[in-house]
Image (cartoon, rainbow, N blue to C red):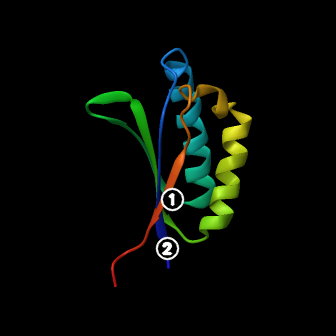
Amino acid sequence: MAVNLYVYYRVDPARAADMRAALRGAQARLGAAWRIDTGLLQRSDDPLTWMETYVQIEDPQGFLAALASELEAIGFSDCLAEGATRHVECFEPCA
């Protein structure tokens, strides 16, 4: 069964603009390679809280490994706000 992944975290304001562009590029590559829809959202009352979305993932573990490689390649870990971590949530349709 395909799942949707939601990843949220807080970004460092000094790195937000550069990371937004790099992350969108990484999502475009992942979307093409995995044939999925991706998205990047910001919280309406806190634009430094971002959420990545990945829809209809058939192989979540494989996808998460590919995502980790993309994030490492763009230096993502340096863009998180001090003390912030990535939170990954996985959802599937209700039975």
Q: Earlier in the sequence, mark 1 or mark 2?
A: 2
Disc 1 or disc 2, which is closer to the eye?
A: 2
Which label was assigned to residue 73? none
Crowdedness near tag 2: few (<14), some (14–19) or many (≥20) residues, C-alpha within 10 Å: few
Does 10 sit left or right of 75 as displayed?
left
**Pointers 1 and 2 in contact (C-beta within 8 Å):** no
Which label was assigned to residue 2? 2
Residue highlighted by disc 1: 36
Q: Residue at x 60, y 60 (%)?
A: 34
Percent coordinates x, y for residue 85 in the rendering: 56, 40
Does 49 sit left or right of 43 as displayed?
right
Q: Residue at x 73, y 46 (%)?
A: 69
Label 1 amino acid? Ile
Q: Residue at x 42, y 37 (%)?
A: 50
Q: Residue at x 50, y 22 (%)?
A: 16
In the displayed orientation, state which residue is furthest to the left.
45
In the displayed orientation, state which residue is furthest to the front.
83
Does 4 sit left or right of 62 as displayed?
left
